[in-house]
Image (cartoon, grey):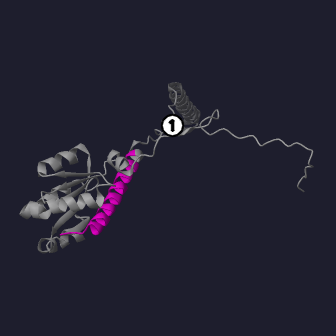
Amino acid sequence: MAAKFGEGEKTKAPRERPPAEERPGSASSSDTLPPTPLRDLLASGGANVFVLSVDPELIETVQRAAGEHYPVFVVAQWAELQAEIRSGRCGIALLDGDLLGIELARRIGELGAHPDRVVVLVAAQRPRAEGLMTLLSERKIHRLLIKPSAPGITRLLIESAVKRCLQLRERNSGDAALSDRRFPPPRRAKRVPTWVFTAAGLALLVGVGVGVATALASWWRAAPSATA
């Protein structure tokens, strides 16, 4: 039941609480670090997208589609892409089929040596792309991008490739942790002291000696009766 106050009664004004940054022990806004952008998190995990192309239209489409959210880099030479793969920075490789030409299938085969580290995307004109369906069904290519491509479908394919790259990195880290786990060494069999074998040997010799002596004694007692 709410309390009622008369006209002559004085009431205390409610005490105002100081702002959070002024209260002792409270975290102020200056102490809170801003969240790390997704782009930086992916870059630190090696999920960088490297585009091997000199086609300005393709490069602009990829940058518009994914440049704000994903780390996208452009290289013009195959040797540059190989160097980035060896360094571990390249997680997704987008190959321009029109740039590589007849070497495209061979280059894809070379990237197949890193199936646990590199996710391969290929962008090509429709006639060339139709000849890559076998590689796509064999999962040597993760996704195939038909040129000219729209930013929407390009973003979806890159998102799928980044997701696959993170899955591979997580699986590889789990396998490494499992291989590094140390199992307890097998128990060594307890060694029997040498004196046990010595005592057993002596007991065996005594037993044999007693048996031989008993046999000789029996034969000696039985010998005179036989000659009589």
Spot occupied by residue 147 in the image (x, y as percentages of width and height):
17, 69
Which amino acid lies under the numbered mark 1 shown in the image of this protein?
Ser
27 is higher (above) or lower (below) than 175: above
Spot occupied by residue 36 in the image (x, y as percentages of width and height):
42, 46
Residue at 17%, 50% in the rendered image: 81
Say which of 1 and 41 sits in front.
1
Main secondary structure type of the part rendered in magenta: helix
Q: Residues within 10 Å of mark 1 (few under 14, many from 20)?
A: few
Say which of 103 and 74 sits in front.
74
105 is higher (above) or lower (below) than 71: below
Helix or strand or loop: what does disc 1 sit on?
helix
Residue at 21%, 46% in the rendered image: 84
Spot occupied by residue 85 in the image (x, y as percentages of width and height):
22, 48
Would you identify the image quadrant in which residue 211 lies? top right
Give the side of residue 117 with respect to residue 12, left or right.
left
Image label count: 1
Give the side of residue 64 with respect to residue 36, left or right.
left
Q: Residue furthest left?
A: 102
Q: Which image quadrant: the C terminus?
A: top right
Say which of 165 and 64 sits in front.
64
Residue at 58%, 33% in the rendered image: 214
Instruction: Indicate yes or no whether the magenta region holds residue 155.
Output: yes
Q: Which residues are magenta?
A: 148-176
Say which of 89 and 137 sits in front.
89
Instruction: Indicate yes or no whether the magenta region holds residue 177.
Output: no
Spot occupied by residue 227 in the image (x, y as percentages of width and height):
53, 36
Query: Badge 1 is on which residue?
Result: 30
Q: Residue furthest front?
A: 7
For residue 190, say whether it is visible: yes
For residue 120, say whether it is visible: no
Q: Which image quadrant: the N terminus?
A: bottom right
